Amino acid sequence: MPRLMPRRSLLSTVSLVALAFAPLPAFARDDAAGDVAKQLSDPGNQVAATVALTALSEALLDIRIEPLRRALGAIGSDRADDLPLDARLRDLAGPGARDLPGDIGRTVPKTMGAAAGMAGAVGEMLPELQAAIDRMKNALPQN
């Protein structure tokens, strides 16, 4: 019997990857955290990230694992010997894999919305963090 990847773990990982698909500016300006929050909460960006990640999840689930099986065999591992020759990643993910793209579609916008809130909170913290950095610089001996 193949070892199955926990569905919640797979879904959480894919949802976090959604953040990489959002157009995030560098935190170089004072209002950058607000820009990040705005981009993450933008419905258009959320739809784009959801569509991209849903398509990506379908493509990844269809990957054949035979090359991995051969590679493991080449290094002397028998960990994949019990997997069928025609197995795909979705076979390892288990029966919930068919629901994964839909779950991603429901989760990505929520995850991006939560990240937008976090970015806003970080933006509010930046003056305090800068003050702490300044205090640390002043506390260190100057060479």
Image (cartoon, rainbow, N blue to C red):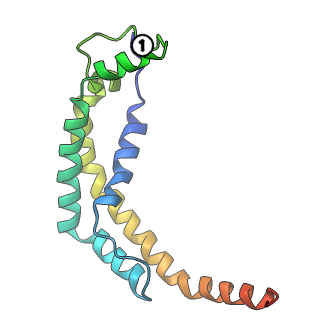
Number of marks present in the image shown? 1
Q: Position of residue 6 (x, y in %)?
A: 42, 30
68 and 131: which is toward the camera: 68
Q: Position of residue 12 (x, y in %)?
A: 40, 45
Q: Point out the image quarter for the N terminus.
A: top left
* Residue lying furthest right: 141
Name the residue located 27 percent from the left edge and 11 percent from the top edge: 85
Badge 1 marks a residue whose secondary structure is helix
| Left or right: 32 as drawn, with respect to 142 | left
Name the residue located 17 percent from the left edge and 67 percent from the top edge: 44
**For residue 51, above or below residue 138:** above
Name the residue located 24 percent from the left edge and 24 percent from the top edge: 64
Q: Which residue is mark 1?
A: 73
Amino acid type of the residue that numbered disc 1 sits on in the rendered structure: Gly
Name the residue located 21 percent from the left edge and 29 percent from the top edge: 62
Residue 30: quarter of image: bottom left
Residue 126: quarter of image: bottom right
Within 10 Å of the Cα at label 1, are there few (<14), some (14-19), or many (20+) other Cα atoms? some
**For residue 79, above or below residue 116:** above
Residue 31: quarter of image: bottom left
